[in-house]
Amino acid sequence: MTPTPYLFFNGQCAEALAAYADIFGGEIMETMPASQMPPDFPVPDDRKDWIMHARLRIADGYLMASDNIMGNSEAMAGASVMMSFPTAAEGKSVFDRLCEGGDVQMAWAPTFWSAGFGTLTDRFGVKWMIGCDEEQNT
């Protein structure tokens, strides 16, 4: 059994997953627009192009996501998506791309446990912890 983060957006799901596919070198495996929901499910007209479900493959894992069709999701709180990369250079590259338009909480830097780590909230409101498996040089 593998845990899979499920992210909620307010109309930016397709844009966010396209950005993540590009940043992480992933592949969007499926996208289901709200317009494909059964007729007895009341989707507001202004949200028919929102995403009811999507799945993005990143290496051996997945991110799943959707837009909150029947309401508005509050900003992500109390959790972050953690991604670890083999090298500090790879981790910093991803961190820098996720930072574009976002808010850095902990700038990318060496730590006592690794050659690089940082935390941020991206432009879509998703909180990230980006690290690397490379040990810090002592």
Image (cartoon, rainbow, N blue to C red):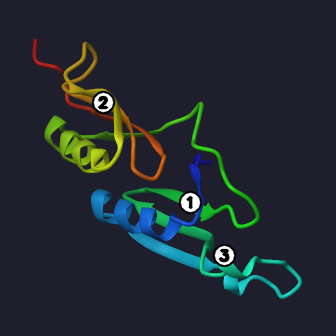
> Could you say whether the residue bearing mark 3 is in a helix, strand or loop?
helix
| 5 displayed left or right of 57 | right
| 133 displayed left or right of 13 | left
Q: CA distance from mark 1 to mark 2?
A: 23 Å
Residue matched to label 3: 47
What amino acid is found at the position of numbered circle 3 in the picture?
A: Arg
Q: Position of residue 51 (x, y in %)?
A: 60, 72
1 or 2: mark nearer the eye: 2
Answer with mark 1 or mark 3, whichever residue precedes in sequence: 3
Vertical side of 77 occupied by 112: above or below:
above
Answer with mark 3 or mark 2, whichever residue precedes in sequence: 3
Q: Position of residue 47 (x, y in %)?
A: 66, 75
Residue matched to label 2: 118
Residue 64: mark in rendering: 1
- Residue closest to the eye, 8 or 25: 8
Vertical side of 138 occupied by 55: above or below:
below
> Could you say whether the residue bearing mark 1 is in a helix, strand or loop?
strand
What amino acid is found at the position of numbered circle 1 in the picture?
A: Met
Crowding near the residue tagged with mark 2, few <14, some 14–19, many ≥20 C-alpha atoms within 10 Å: many
What amino acid is found at the position of numbered circle 2 in the picture?
A: Gly
Q: Residue at x 24, y 17 (%)?
A: 111
Q: Position of residue 2 (x, y in %)?
A: 58, 48
Marks 3 and 2 in Cβ contact (< 8 Å) = no
